[in-house]
Amino acid sequence: MSLESMRKDVVAAIDALGGELIQLSHAIHAEPELSLAEFKASARLADAVEGHGLPVTREAFGMKTGFVSEFGSGPTVALLSEYDALPGIGHACGHNIIAAIGYGAAIGLAKLGANLPGTVRYVGTPAEEAHGGKELMARFGAFDGVDAAMMIHPSNLNLITMPTIAVADVEAIYHGRAAHASAMPFRGLNALDAVVTAYTAIAQLRQHIRNTERIHGIITDGGMAPNIVPERAACRFFIRAADIHDLLKLKKRVVACFEAGAMATGCRLELNWTGADYLDLKTNWPLAESFKQHAEHLGRNFFPLEEIPPGFAGSTDMGNVSHRVPSIHPMLAVAPSDVIIHNPEFTRWARSDTGDAAVIDGAKALALTALDLMADGTTLPRVRSDFEATAELSRLAVVAVEAGHHHHAGCGCR
């Protein structure tokens, strides 16, 4: 069977699946679930895969809300679905669209049956917004033996790749001593003062970091009552840098600010690094160009990367995958250019006609890109060559993030 015939069959299969894909996207959107608690979304997707006669392993790769379905023979492409939501604003990152795209691409390829020229590993990857689900799954072998990994993210622009930087997520808790704030303040150790001191020190530090670095956070606990010296106070910060090596250096400077709060007040500092650090995204350009051609054929026009404003970047645990295997993480527009992700307005666009159109376009473009890698004899060698050009840097990045597992952290595309 020719590659062109397979492309036509896959596109036709995804068109036939259109109603199911949109229904899945809407159902996941209607019941948003936070990281590590995506039980309904995970079950919906796994049930749907089984409904097409494909095998599914639930609670896969160490994640209760993860799953995997693998079928076919030959070069292996991992297609990924995310499905966690954000606190308070639901699917303002559009992970319902990501879920449906990955599912549609996988099932569309499965419809080739015995003519499928490779292996599809369809992976449900929870906890992207917090905890670094893909990094944790990678350590359980989720991407072992994979020739390429792919997913698509919704956005307000069509972008061939997601501009990203590395990120860590830390909670600082200060333990002081309560006392009556008026009668006996001298007996207290003010944990809120420790947080404020650390917050102020970090604000001062922000004046002297690189333009590729970010530090931002909130106070999550400030005490119980104005007339009680707070015996506990806490804050949570995200720390970002261009890559893991710069991130490790910046984290030390931020920790010094936290320690200053403890030293100034006599409180005890407890630092909790959540999950795993997120690496910057290493885009595989031969794969990205293949995706771009297919998406343009579907009518998508891509915003020039060179016109993206400096500092316009988020973070994703897909970065951790991209340093292990050749990967792409393009973005498809579902909202107007002035509506950005992680905004309540974006939640509405994630369940809109343009969001639904991205589900269908994304599933087709992703599946067609996977077909190129499986069946076009020139694509896989170019993909491997591009990855190997910086393989040693990637190896060091993975070593760094794994070595810091006990105290590093990450947050998703925030």
Image (tube, rainbow, N blue to C red):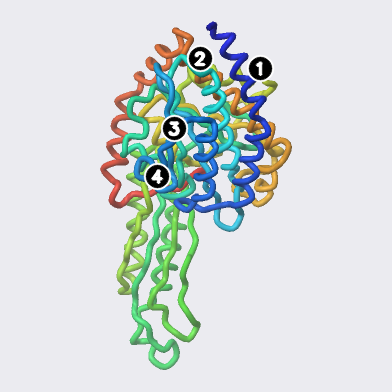
Residue 246 position, x and y percent, is 36, 40
Task: Identify which amino acid the numbered label 4 is placed on.
Answer: Glu
Instruction: Determine which of the numbered discs, if any, sits on residue 19 in the image.
Output: none
Of label 1 and label 4, which has the lower sequence position? 4
Q: Real-space Cα distance between discs 4 and 3?
A: 13 Å
Is there CB contact under 8 Å for labels 1 and 4? no
Give the crowd class for mark 3: few <14, some 14-19, many >=20 residues within 10 Å: some
- On the image, numbered disc 3 is attached to which residue? 55
Q: Position of residue 410 (x, y in %)?
A: 41, 47
Circle number at residue 297: 1
Check disc 2 and report the residue beneath it: 372
Disc 1 packing (10 Å; few <14; some 14–19; many ≥20): few
> Could you tell me which secondary element the residue under label 3 belongs to?
loop
In the picture, measured across the screen, residue 140 lies left or right of residue 227, that is left
Q: Nearer the viewer, mark 3 or mark 2?
A: 3
Q: Earlier in the sequence, mark 2 or mark 1?
A: 1
- Distance from the alpha carbon under mark 1 to that under mark 4: 37 Å
> Which of the two residues, 70 or 381, is positioned nearer the viewer here?
70
In the structure shown, which secondary structural element does the residue marked by tag 4 occupy?
A: loop
Q: CA distance from mark 2 to mark 1?
A: 15 Å
Are the two marked residues, 1 and 3, in contact with CB atoms closer than 8 angstroms? Answer: no
Tag 4 residue? 59
Looking at the image, is mark 1 or mark 4 nearer the viewer?
A: 4
Q: Residue at x 60, y 36 (%)?
A: 154
Note whether 313 is above or below 86 in the view shown: above
* Amino acid on which the number 2 mark rests in the picture: Asp
Sequence order check, earlier mark of 1 and 3: 3
Q: Position of residue 384 (x, y in %)?
A: 38, 17
